[in-house]
């Protein structure tokens, strides 16, 4: 089945469907509506379906492991496409194990482990509370909440003091911290 | 979202058919091959008083051979009817065959179509489409057999035309046939329920459960008969095409139809409760 045929079948179910958004997303992913879905690789198929999902303009969009099967340039394309199509009225919920692929685009994080919610907080709340950085063994002090050895020194989560600068959330570290301290 | 919107239902029906049509074509192609093979096998395996068809034609003449061949074709019709019934039962218990895998289920449940519409779409495919497709397969297989017969120089006779003869429709048997239809519908509704209840191995588990159910049902009836001391009494509802006990007949019919409605309703309720990620054997 061609992507255009797939779109023709499913678009009547989405009243806010936009052909323009679909074409823009496909252009960003370097695809066209003429592609045959059966002949695409897993990653390309994913890009085609994601383009259609974004074009439906639904209020809520759920994505399960969206970056699985995508190569490195495609992951950047994915982030760009999502960022371009985000609006105030729309919520994209991403469930993933590939946390590094999406950590720059999140504004709310939920960490689930063994049927329980370990963390439910906005990125702002997390960055207000913690700093994520690399420290040498000499810099390890009582503010450190969690540390992991790494090639750049110890990757740590520490309590944020008033004069500390805001840092980028390290999701993998945060996940390990939350699962080990539960 | 409204429970039922006719436009959306029509779109959903069309959409599901387009997505699954290749599978349906494959199923009906298999039906045509099986039915054609069986039709040709039944009409070829028979020997006419120990003679081949050509020798028998020379010996008995065309009129006698046509009559004999007609009897042979009645076996084909009986097989076709049994095949149709089995196809309907398999279709019923494979009501949700397209929801086997987790991604299929999540995509189906997130589809912006109401549960009632989705359920009716499944029913239309697995009951109506299966019925129409199987009847068409039977007709095509019959046409193939007729074609082979013509090429073979045999009499040209459609087995489908013998259906009325076999079931004696010309006699006043409408009430008996209605009763038979009701029983078939009741059994089919049990398979619909089984297909919705079991998550894996739908056909095997449903068939075994239905068999066990009937064994238990007959035992209970037997026990009731003994309990009320009615072993020696003969209870007849329909005899030679006529209803002998109207009260019992209509109670039976209404009871069966009520159970059919309950089974379909239960099946719908099971569908609405179906979970995307679930390793249980039952959809409860």
Image (cartoon, coloured by chain):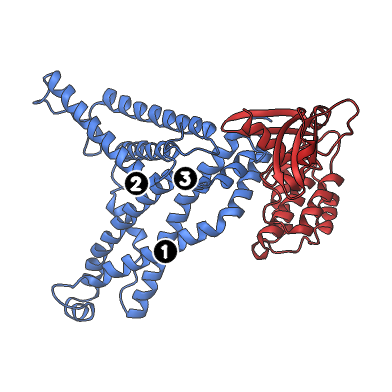
In the picture, measured across the screen, residue B154 lies left or right of residue A57, that is left
Q: Give chain A's shade.
A: red
Residue B154, x across and y down, in percent: 30, 76
Look at the numbered discs 2 and 1 and tell me whether their residues touch, using CB distance below 8 Å: no
Residue annotated with mark 2 = B204
Q: Quadrant of residue B47?
A: bottom left
Residue annotated with mark 1 = B32
Distance (Cα) linking label 2 and label 1: 24 Å
Task: Out of B225 and B71, give the one closest to the viewer.
Answer: B225
In the picture, measured across the screen, residue B177 lies left or right of residue A117, that is left
Label disc, if present, on residue B127 of the rendered structure:
3
Q: Give chain B's shade.
A: blue
Chain bearing tag 1 is B
Vertical comparison of B192 with B219: above or below: below
Distance (Cα) linking label 3 and label 1: 18 Å
Same chain assignment for discs 3 and 1: yes
């Amino acid at each position: 089945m061609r992507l255009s045929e797939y779109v023709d079948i499913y678009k009547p179910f989405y009243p806010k469907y936009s052909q323009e958004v679909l074409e823009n997303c496909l252009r960003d992913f370097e695809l066209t509506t003429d592609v045959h879905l059966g002949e695409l690789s897993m990653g390309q198929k994913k890009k085609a379906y994601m383009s259609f999902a974004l074009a439906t303009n639904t209020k809520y969009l759920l994505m399960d492991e969206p970056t699985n099967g995508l190569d490195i340039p495609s992951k950047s394309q994915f982030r760009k496409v999502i960022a371009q199509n985000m609006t105030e009225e729309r919520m994209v919920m991403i469930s993933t194990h590939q946390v590094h692929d999406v950590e720059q685009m999140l504004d709310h994080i939920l960490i689930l482990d063994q049927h329980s919610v370990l963390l439910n907080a906005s990125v702002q709340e997390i960055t207000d509370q913690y700093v994520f950085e690399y420290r040498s063994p000499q810099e390890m002090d009582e503010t450190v909440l969690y540390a992991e050895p790494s090639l750049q020194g110890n990757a740590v989560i520490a309590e944020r003091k008033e004069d500390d600068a805001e840092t980028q959330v390290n999701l993998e570290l945060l996940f390990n911290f939350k699962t080990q301290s539960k | 979202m409204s429970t039922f919107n006719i436009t959306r239902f029509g779109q959903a029906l069309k959409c599901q058919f387009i997505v699954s049509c290749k599978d349906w074509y494959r199923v009906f192609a298999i039906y045509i091959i099986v039915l054609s093979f069986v039709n040709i096998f039944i009409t070829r395996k028979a020997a006419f008083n120990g003679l081949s068809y050509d020798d028998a034609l020379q010996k008995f003449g065309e009129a006698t051979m046509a009559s004999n061949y007609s009897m042979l074709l009645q076996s084909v019709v009986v097989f076709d009817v049994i095949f149709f019934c089995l196809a309907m039962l398999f279709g019923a218990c494979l009501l949700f065959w397209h929801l086997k895998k987790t991604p299929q289920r999540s995509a189906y449940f997130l589809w912006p179509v109401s549960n009632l519409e989705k359920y009716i779409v499944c029913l239309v495919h697995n009951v109506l489409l299966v019925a129409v497709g199987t009847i068409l397969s039977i007709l095509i297989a019959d046409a193939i057999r007729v074609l082979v017969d013509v090429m073979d120089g045999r009499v040209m006779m459609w087995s489908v035309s013998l259906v009325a003869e076999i079931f004696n429709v010309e006699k006043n048997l409408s009430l008996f046939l209605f009763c038979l239809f009701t029983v078939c519908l009741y059994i089919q509704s049990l398979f619909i329920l089984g297909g919705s209840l079991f998550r894996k191995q739908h056909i095997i588990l449903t068939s075994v459960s239905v068999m066990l159910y009937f064994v238990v049902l007959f035992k209970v009836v037997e026990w009731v008969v003994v309990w009320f001391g009615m072993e020696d009494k003969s209870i007849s509802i329909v005899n030679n095409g006529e209803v002998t006990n109207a009260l019992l007949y209509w109670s039976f019919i209404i009871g069966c139809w009520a159970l059919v409605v309950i089974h379909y309703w239960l099946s719908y309720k099971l569908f609405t409760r179906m979970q995307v990620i679930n390793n249980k054997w039952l959809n409860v």
